[in-house]
Image (cartoon, grey):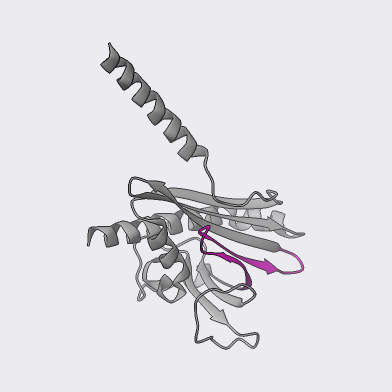
Amino acid sequence: MAAQHLKALALLLSFQIIGVFSTFTNLPDVPPGDFNVSTRIEIRSTKHAAWEALTDFARYPEWNPFVRASIMVSSDNITLPDQYPREGRRLFLRTQIPPLPIPVDKDTPDVELHTQYSYENVTHVQRGRGRLAWASNDSSIQAERWSAVSNLGRGRMLYESREVFNGALVKDLATQLGKALQAGFDAQGQALKLLLEECDRD
């Protein structure tokens, strides 16, 4: 009888843990904006490994089907020797919207029709919390993207990313590119999982 009670208690606790993980978020609580896209995925890896991958901008072309280039630049658009993200610095992005098919590598060509360019400002680099953010502040569209990584225990971690958009042209953006942007966020999460879990097997 005692053994049955212990099994029932263990099962109940496992359901509670699953519930906590399914609702847990490491992303900051911000207003939803006029439009937003987000993704979250559990990965068999560590917070440290995920953080290293997300902040190693030079290697994005090797695995990222959505953000094909992420380059820290000076105010006059010169590539900086230090490519680690730092708050207040400028970031040049070249993206594929919708994303390229997974997997990709550094030699995978962009689809010219789907190529978008933007300049962003790095707003938060919170290594201890596992959070990174950048933002654009165009007169017609303002956006901030947060990415977060968290340890879940038992050799698993959680990757989350969300971008919130505001501004006069956001409705048009959502209509024209909303589904493709969501696909890009999902593809980056899936590609990060593929990258980290393959590294874990090596």
Q: Along the horizontal axis of the image, is 86 left or right of 136?
A: left
- Return the residue nearer the eye: 198 or 34: 198
* Image quadrant assignment for residue 163: bottom right
Residue furthest top as drawn = 1
Picture quarter with the N terminus: top left
* Image quadrant assignment for residue 116: bottom right
- Return the residue nearer the eye: 172 or 162: 162
Q: Position of residue 149 (x, y in %)?
A: 47, 55
Q: Is residue 67 magenta?
A: no
Q: Position of residue 173 (x, y in %)?
A: 66, 58
Asked if residue 94 is positioned above or below residue 177 in the image, the reply reads below
Residue furthest front as drawn = 2
Q: Position of residue 93 (x, y in %)?
A: 55, 73
Q: Position of residue 191 (x, y in %)?
A: 38, 59
Q: Residue at x 35, y 67 (%)?
A: 104
Q: Residue at x 67, y 62 (%)?
A: 143
Q: Is residue 129 magenta?
A: yes
Picture quarter with the C terminus: bottom left
Q: Main secondary structure of the magenta part?
A: strand
Q: How many marks?
A: 0
Q: Along the horizontal axis of the image, is 44 left or right of 180?
A: left
Asked if residue 141 is positioned above or below residue 14 in the image, the reply reads below
Q: Residue at x 47, y 69 (%)?
A: 55
Q: Which portion, as a residue range, is magenta?
A: 120-141
Q: Residue at x 43, y 49 (%)?
A: 41
- Return the residue nearer the eye: 139 or 57: 57
Residue furthest left as drawn = 202
Q: Along the horizontal axis of the image, is 168 left or right of 175?
A: right
